[in-house]
Amino acid sequence: MARLEERATHARQAGAPAEYRQVKTALTKLEAIGRQLIAPLWDEMQLTLPPGLAERGELQVAVSPEDFVPWLADRARLRLVTGQHDAESVEPLEVGSGLQSLLELAAQQAAGTPTADVAFKSTYWANENVKV
């Protein structure tokens, strides 16, 4: 997740990464859609309140790149095609143990954590110790 954070957030004093600008633009659009979706809820809520108790109100939506990174990492999964027999792709648990070991080593190397405990789950390929 550290690599995702590095590219999707703007944590350094240097210029913002291009990916950060793209994420920020997309999140701004999602916030606008979210406001449209939840705006009617306040109107419905206000109808149940006694008159005069709440003069105005609004439901707000705020999503930051820092919120987006863990959401994305939780939904990332690895699918593999190793030949004609699995042309539609398979999960890492469905390949041989040799390839699973090599994938684990590759993930550790990419994460910069040689002792990381990498797990291949049946649906999602994610582990808090693996830095995507």
Image: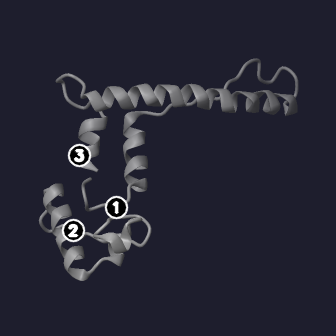
Q: Position of residue 4 (x, y in %)?
A: 28, 44
Mark 2, Cα crowd under 10 Å, few <14 / some 14-19 / many 20+, is some
Asked if 75 appears above or below 85 in the picture, the reply is above
| Disc nearer the start of the sequence (1/2) | 1
Mark 1, Cα crowd under 10 Å, few <14 / some 14-19 / many 20+, is some
**Image quarter of residue 86:** bottom left
Q: Nearer the viewer, mark 1 or mark 3?
A: 1
Residue type, label 1: Leu
Image marks 1 and 2: residues in contact by CB distance under 8 Å: yes
Q: Dot 2: what SS?
A: helix
Residue type, label 3: Arg
In the rendered structure, the answer to whether residue 63 lies left or right of residue 1 reads right
In the rendered structure, the answer to whether residue 73 lies left or right of residue 4 reads right
Please state which of residues 126 and 56 is positioned toward the viewer in this rendering.
126
Quick one: which residue is furthest to the bottom in this view? 97
Identity of the residue drawn at 46% across and 30% down: 27
**Image quarter of residue 13:** top left
Q: Nearer the viewer, mark 3 or mark 2?
A: 2
Q: Which residue is mark 2?
A: 103
| Disc nearer the start of the sequence (1/3) | 3
Identity of the residue drawn at 24% across and 48% down: 2
Q: Position of residue 23 (x, y in %)?
A: 38, 32
Q: Position of residue 111 (x, y in %)?
A: 18, 56
Identity of the residue drawn at 25% across and 37% down: 7
Q: Which residue is mark 1?
A: 78
